[in-house]
């Protein structure tokens, strides 16, 4: 069998496009009105956390086999938002973080109150949902410095880090 031909390449479906997605947070604790809609519309990028399987080695007489070990998930969920003139994204994340754990008092709410579920939907070129990911126990863990810059007139983006407990793709086997 030789390398793939043009005919074989043409038989493949169109490639996935990175901008065909939607991230939905039904509620955002402590956030101003309209924050859920702003998160959905102003989300510039979202990186679904990766999965890992740790290898386990079996050695005998100079030979080594690799077996599948413990399966884990990366818990960092990176999201970049385009900010609006009302600064709703920064306000929402900042208030959610304060709701989670107030830095002045070190008091906060229970995980069942601040950890939220979210949905990430991937679409094809016609807007048909091709995969849906449910993210569980999401909460903001870091928000970067706010970029005020008097030397330029740039669009402000907020690249925040969230933590998740785990995610599942709808339709995958249990």
Image (cartoon, rainbow, N blue to C red):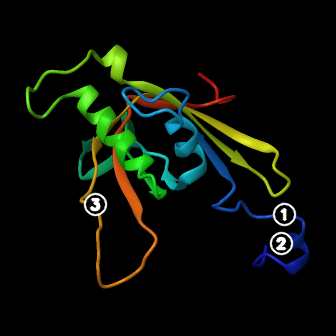
CB atoms at circles 1 and 3 under 8 Å apart? no
The answer to whether residue 130 is visible is yes
Q: Nearer the viewer, mark 1 or mark 3?
A: 3
The residues bearing labels 1 and 3 have C-alpha atoms spaced at a distance of 44 Å
Q: Residue at x 36, y 83 (%)?
A: 152
The residues bearing labels 2 and 1 have C-alpha atoms spaced at a distance of 6 Å
CB atoms at circles 2 and 1 under 8 Å apart? yes
Seen from the viewer's position, the closer of residues 151 and 39 is 151
Seen from the viewer's position, the closer of residues 151 and 167 is 151
Q: Where does residue 63 sit, x and y in percent of width and height?
A: 30, 51
Q: Which tag, 2 or 3, sits closer to the chain's start? A: 2
Residue bearing mark 2: 9
Residue 62, above or below 30: below
Q: Where does residue 9 sit, x and y in percent of width and height?
A: 83, 72
The answer to whether residue 74 is visible is no
The image's mark for residue 146 is: 3
Residue bearing mark 1: 12
**Element carrying mark 2:** helix
Left or right relative to 53: residue 111: left
Q: Nearer the viewer, mark 2 or mark 3?
A: 3
Q: Residue at x 8, y 32 (%)?
A: 104
């Amino acid at each position: 069998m030789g390398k793939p031909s043009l005919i074989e390449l043409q038989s493949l479906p169109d490639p996935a496009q990175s901008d065909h997605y939607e991230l939905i947070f039904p509620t955002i604790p402590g956030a101003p009105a309209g924050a859920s809609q702003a998160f959905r519309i102003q989300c510039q990028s979202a990186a679904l956390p990766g999965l890992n399987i740790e290898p386990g080695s079996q050695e005998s007489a100079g030979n080594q086999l690799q077996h599948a070990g413990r399966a884990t998930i990366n818990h960092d969920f990176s999201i970049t938002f385009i900010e609006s003139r009302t600064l709703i994204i920064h306000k929402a994340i900042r208030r959610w973080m304060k709701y989670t754990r107030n830095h002045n008092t070190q008091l906060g709410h229970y995980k069942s109150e601040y950890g939220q579920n979210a949905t990430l939907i991937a679409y094809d070129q016609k807007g048909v949902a091709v995969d849906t990911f449910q993210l569980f126990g999401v909460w903001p863990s870091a928000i970067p410095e706010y970029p005020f810059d008097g030397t330029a007139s740039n669009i402000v983006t907020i690249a925040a880090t969230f933590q998740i407990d785990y995610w599942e793709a709808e339709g995958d086997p249990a």
